Image (tube, grey):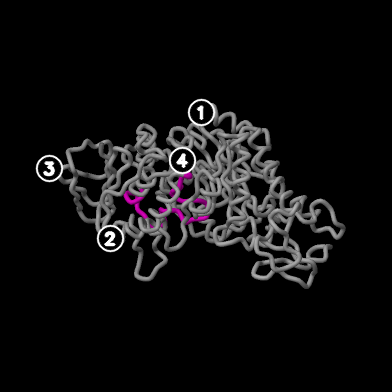
Amino acid sequence: MPAWLKDAIFYEIYPQSFKDTNGDGIGDINGIIEKLDYVKSLGCNALWINPCYDSPFKDAGYDVRDYKKVAPRYGTNEDLYKLFEEAHKRDIHVLLDLVPGHTSEEHEWFLESKKATRNEYSDRYVWTNGWLQGVPGHPYIGGEADRDGCYMLNFFKCQPALNYGFLNRTEDWQKAPDDPACLATREALKDVMRFWLDRGCDGFRVDMADSLVKEDDENKSATGAIWKDIRAMLDADYPEAAIISEWSNPMQSLKSGFHADFYLDHHGNGYNTLLRDYETAGGDHSFLKKDGNGDIMRFLNDFLPKYDSTKDDGYISFITCNHDTPRPRRTLEFQELKLATALFLTLPGVPFIYYGDEIGMRYLDIPTKEGGYTRTGSRTPMQWNHGKNLGFSDADSKDIYLPVDPSADAPTVTSQENDPDSLLSTVKALTKIRHEYTDLHADSEFEVVYAEAEEFPFVFKRGELYVAINPSEKKAGVSVSKKREKIYEIGTTEIKENSLIMDPQSFVILK
């Protein structure tokens, strides 16, 4: 386990929307370098950068055309090497996004695989034996290759599935996971990882990490075996490199070798009930919504079994949001956002802050861009100041990657950085405390102290620290065993005799 993960607070950067330095309207690597001091000031000591590889951008870069080449719109490979170097000068680790389950249909491997004449790439992707033979139970494409066969898709039409084999085979064209062709795919993935690790990358966030072996068993054992093999490579040759999975099943992912796994926003799961429980009948009952009348037990009943069974294997990662998820500002007000950030930065595991969430950027209702669809509204340009394009780019507004927030009160870094009561200042205070107290680090003990269905507050223990949150509109109280000292609070809390009294929408850390 890389030791640096214990105290890591990640900042996710969607590169095309972060900072444009050459005036073409698209964010670039030099823009990330320019803002590294800002990332450091925020209290984040690690970055996750969404795909910045060469791509046709039919799925915003998750359709990779060349794994070893930076997309020209972002700069050059040398720019990315410099980013690693400059980040390391500031004690910031950098994870790239790894897309192992598919490539672009324009990738050289796939162009070779499509050919009628067999070659070393013919079996790099999943193909059937004939043009009339589809892929049962999976999306596929036929009629677009000289080769006599249909090929399987991993997600969008532009993303042919790489071939890691089928565990339970029912067709003669399906290969076993240990078939030489499938092992060659695995080794090609390792080669990509080594390429970037050798040049200063600190590891990878892995896209759709559970999607490798098809017709896998319910425990994803065959896919897990691949990641265990990759973890063995990392442990041997890159022991400080981290791999974090987009899997949202820590009982599978962490036991398969990942160091951390994202707790994703899946409808009805524990994370979803905290701040995005607005797709059910009867209104928004999110725990962090002041008038949601939420139930912390809906979160704990989902989270605790996952945490208890994996806490010795790795970390569960809470996110404020990500590029696939509606921004929390969609439904939460600033005080609610402060409490949400406070909760995510004090729970166990490795937390992630999505760019712009630290200032409360809005989710915008805008048309799709590069396969974003409803996700596009969370991918708008970072809002630095109230200058042109809110400080993102000097390009004409019609030429920027996505429109910026047109509201007169659009939140910006400059409007919040000198306001001690701002969301940005709150985030900085919380990251500082998390770094200062090892009891708040990823691996410190976590114990529920008080949690009752449809009641407030929620109180838990991290090491010797106590954390309490009352996101409701009502005053709430809970007994405490002895007089304790406040380390930090949001809103107003009071320790009176043997009780902790919390005003509406308040949070406190006690020692």
* Label 1 neighbour load within 10 Å: few <14, some 14-19, many 20+: few
Q: Which of the two labelled residues, at mark 3 and mark 2, occupies the earlier sequence position?
A: 2
Amino acid at circle 2: Ala
Q: Is residue 113 part of the magenta span, yes or no?
A: no
* Label 3 neighbour load within 10 Å: few <14, some 14-19, many 20+: few
Q: Nearer the viewer, mark 2 or mark 4?
A: 2
Percent x, y of residue 504: 23, 52
Residue, disc 1 = 90
Residue, disc 3 = 497
Residue, disc 4 = 385
Q: Nearer the viewer, mark 2 or mark 1?
A: 2
Please identify the quadrant where the C terminus is shown: top left
Q: Which of the two labelled residues, at mark 4 and mark 3, occupies the earlier sequence position?
A: 4
Q: Most prominent secondary structure in the magenta stretch?
A: loop
Question: Label 3's element?
Answer: loop
Q: Which residues are magenta?
A: 313-337
* Label 4 neighbour load within 10 Å: few <14, some 14-19, many 20+: some
Q: Which of the two labelled residues, at mark 1 and mark 4, occupies the earlier sequence position?
A: 1
Q: CA distance from mark 4 to mark 3?
A: 47 Å
Q: CA distance from mark 2 to mark 1?
A: 44 Å
In the picture as drawn, the residue positioned furthest to the top comes out as 89
